[in-house]
């Protein structure tokens, strides 16, 4: 919650700047990621290649009637599968660190 408020405040103070937020494993949560996407802020957190990512659940009105409610959405491919997929397109980002700019 505090990290999301910090992202909102910095985005409000610097609306015309590209903002990147770097966090450790505690910051790799969906809520903060969606919060950053909404404000067009880049969130960089460590992820394992075997993490399981899922789609968001459908709204209650659109869920099938009479079936057991799902706890998580449909599973997405793992990062390892996405990395090996030839149709995956990456984009380069410049990071300034230790007095040098690096492209990754």
Image (cartoon, helix red, strand yellow):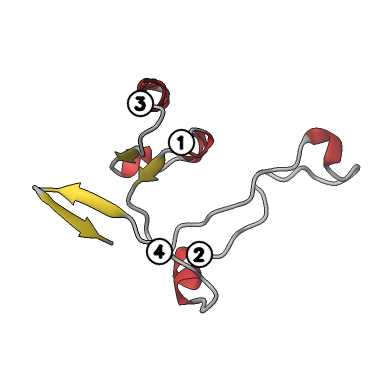
Q: Quadrant of residue 92?
A: bottom left
**Badge 2: residue crowd in 10 Å (few <14, some 14–19, many ≥20):** some
Q: Is the Cβ of the residue at disc 2 closer than 8 Å to that at disc 1?
A: no
Q: Is the Cβ of the residue at disc 3 closer than 8 Å to that at disc 4?
A: no
The residue located at (42%, 38%) in the rendering is 41
Mark closer to the chain start, 4 or 2: 4
Name, please, the residue furthest toward the left. Answer: 99
Residues under labels 3 and 1: Cα distance?
Answer: 14 Å
**Badge 1: residue crowd in 10 Å (few <14, some 14–19, many ≥20):** many
Q: Is the Cβ of the residue at disc 4 closer than 8 Å to that at disc 2?
A: yes
The residue located at (20%, 58%) in the rendering is 102
Residues under labels 2 and 3: Cα distance?
Answer: 34 Å
Q: Which residue is mark 2?
A: 78
Q: Which residue is mark 4?
A: 49
Q: Quadrant of residue 14?
A: top left
- Residue 93, horizontal then vertical, whole percent: 33, 55
């Amino acid at each position: 919650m505090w990290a999301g408020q910090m992202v909102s405040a910095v985005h409000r103070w610097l609306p015309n700047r590209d903002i990147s937020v770097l966090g450790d494993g505690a910051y790799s949560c969906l809520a903060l990621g969606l919060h950053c996407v909404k404000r067009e802020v880049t969130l960089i957190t460590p992820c394992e290649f075997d993490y399981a990512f899922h789609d968001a659940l459908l709204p209650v009105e659109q869920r099938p009637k009479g079936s057991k409610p799902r706890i998580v959405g449909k599973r997405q491919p793992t990062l390892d599968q996405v990395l090996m997929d030839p149709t995956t397109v990456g984009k380069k980002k410049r990071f300034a660190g230790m007095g040098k700019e690096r492209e990754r």
